[in-house]
Image: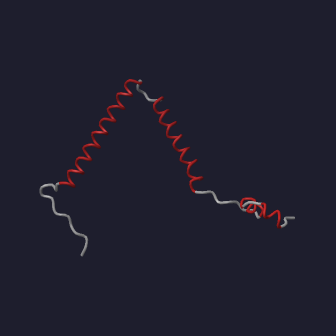
Amino acid sequence: MVNLNSLKKLDKDDLLHLIGLETRRDTTEQLLPVLGAFAAGILVGAGLGLLLAPKPGNQLRDDLKQRLASGQEYLTNAVGRVTGESAQPQQGAQPPVSRTA
Protein backbone atom coordinates (compact mmCIF):
# COMPACT_ATOMS: atom_id res chain seq x y z
CA MET A 1 0.00 0.00 0.00
CA VAL A 2 1.24 3.45 -0.86
CA ASN A 3 0.91 6.10 1.79
CA LEU A 4 1.21 9.88 1.51
CA ASN A 5 4.82 10.01 2.70
CA SER A 6 5.97 7.52 0.08
CA LEU A 7 4.09 9.49 -2.62
CA LYS A 8 6.02 12.63 -1.69
CA LYS A 9 9.30 10.80 -2.31
CA LEU A 10 8.33 9.65 -5.82
CA ASP A 11 9.19 11.67 -8.88
CA LYS A 12 6.98 12.20 -11.92
CA ASP A 13 8.13 9.08 -13.78
CA ASP A 14 7.58 6.88 -10.72
CA LEU A 15 4.06 8.22 -10.24
CA LEU A 16 3.20 7.68 -13.88
CA HIS A 17 4.62 4.13 -13.73
CA LEU A 18 2.50 3.50 -10.63
CA ILE A 19 -0.70 4.12 -12.62
CA GLY A 20 0.58 2.37 -15.75
CA LEU A 21 1.66 5.37 -17.84
CA GLU A 22 4.95 6.77 -19.08
CA THR A 23 6.17 10.14 -20.28
CA ARG A 24 5.81 10.88 -23.96
CA ARG A 25 9.02 10.82 -25.97
CA ASP A 26 10.05 14.10 -27.53
CA THR A 27 10.07 14.41 -31.33
CA THR A 28 13.84 14.83 -31.43
CA GLU A 29 14.27 11.67 -29.36
CA GLN A 30 12.38 9.77 -32.04
CA LEU A 31 13.82 11.55 -35.09
CA LEU A 32 17.55 11.60 -34.33
CA PRO A 33 18.09 7.81 -34.30
CA VAL A 34 16.17 7.49 -37.57
CA LEU A 35 18.24 10.22 -39.23
CA GLY A 36 21.46 8.66 -37.94
CA ALA A 37 20.53 5.27 -39.36
CA PHE A 38 19.55 6.89 -42.66
CA ALA A 39 22.88 8.74 -42.90
CA ALA A 40 24.79 5.57 -42.07
CA GLY A 41 22.87 3.74 -44.79
CA ILE A 42 23.74 6.41 -47.32
CA LEU A 43 27.43 6.18 -46.43
CA VAL A 44 27.46 2.39 -46.61
CA GLY A 45 25.61 2.43 -49.93
CA ALA A 46 27.99 4.99 -51.41
CA GLY A 47 30.99 3.01 -50.21
CA LEU A 48 29.66 -0.23 -51.66
CA GLY A 49 28.86 1.53 -54.91
CA LEU A 50 32.42 2.76 -55.20
CA LEU A 51 33.86 -0.62 -54.27
CA LEU A 52 31.73 -2.45 -56.81
CA ALA A 53 32.19 0.10 -59.60
CA PRO A 54 33.32 -1.45 -62.89
CA LYS A 55 36.08 1.14 -63.35
CA PRO A 56 39.53 1.22 -61.76
CA GLY A 57 40.21 3.87 -59.11
CA ASN A 58 42.03 6.34 -61.38
CA GLN A 59 39.30 6.29 -64.00
CA LEU A 60 36.60 6.56 -61.35
CA ARG A 61 38.28 9.57 -59.73
CA ASP A 62 38.73 11.27 -63.12
CA ASP A 63 35.08 10.61 -63.97
CA LEU A 64 33.95 12.03 -60.62
CA LYS A 65 36.14 15.12 -61.12
CA GLN A 66 34.64 15.70 -64.58
CA ARG A 67 31.09 15.28 -63.29
CA LEU A 68 31.70 17.64 -60.37
CA ALA A 69 33.29 20.21 -62.68
CA SER A 70 30.38 20.03 -65.12
CA GLY A 71 27.90 20.29 -62.25
CA GLN A 72 29.73 23.31 -60.88
CA GLU A 73 29.75 24.90 -64.34
CA TYR A 74 26.02 24.18 -64.73
CA LEU A 75 25.24 25.79 -61.37
CA THR A 76 27.41 28.81 -62.16
CA ASN A 77 25.62 29.29 -65.49
CA ALA A 78 22.21 28.82 -63.87
CA VAL A 79 22.98 31.38 -61.17
CA GLY A 80 24.32 33.77 -63.82
CA ARG A 81 21.13 33.40 -65.87
CA VAL A 82 18.90 33.95 -62.86
CA THR A 83 20.79 37.00 -61.61
CA GLY A 84 21.07 38.36 -65.15
CA GLU A 85 17.34 37.94 -65.74
CA SER A 86 16.39 39.60 -62.48
CA ALA A 87 18.72 42.54 -63.04
CA GLN A 88 17.93 43.23 -66.71
CA PRO A 89 14.74 42.25 -68.52
CA GLN A 90 15.26 40.36 -71.78
CA GLN A 91 14.55 42.09 -75.06
CA GLY A 92 11.03 41.46 -76.31
CA ALA A 93 9.91 40.27 -72.89
CA GLN A 94 6.53 41.40 -71.68
CA PRO A 95 6.31 43.41 -68.47
CA PRO A 96 5.25 41.47 -65.39
CA VAL A 97 1.50 41.18 -64.86
CA SER A 98 0.11 42.66 -61.68
CA ARG A 99 -2.02 40.16 -59.77
CA THR A 100 -3.88 42.83 -57.81
CA ALA A 101 -7.15 44.08 -59.21
Q: Which residue is depicted at the point 25% across and 70% down?
A: 99
Question: Which of 27/48 is in front?
Answer: 27
Vertical side of 38 occupied by 20: above or below: below
User: What sort of colour scheme is used for the picture?
Assistant: secondary structure
Q: Quadrant of residue 94?
A: bottom left
Residue depicted at x 53% and y 47% = 35
On-image quarter of the C terminus = bottom left
Residue in front for this viewpoint, 11 or 25:
11
In the current view of this chain or complex, which residue is farthest to the right? Answer: 1
Picture coordinates of residue 84 (x, y %)?
Answer: 20, 50
Q: Which residue of the protein is positioned furthest toward the left in this rendering?
A: 92
Q: On screen, 53 above or below 21?
A: above
Where residue 14 sits in the image (x, y, percent)? 75, 59
Q: Quadrant of the N terminus?
A: bottom right
For residue 76, which quarter of the picture? top left
Q: Is residue 20 left or right of residue 52?
A: right
Look at 56% across and 49% down and name the residue there. 32
User: Foreground: 72 or 12?
Assistant: 12
Q: Nearer the viewer, residue 85 or 42?
A: 85
* Above-or-below relation of 37 to 90: above
Residue 12 as seen in the image, left or right of residue 3: left
- Residue 63 image point, x, y percent: 35, 30
Q: Position of residue 92 (x, y in %)?
A: 12, 58
Give the answer, above or below, for where 77 lies relative to 16: above
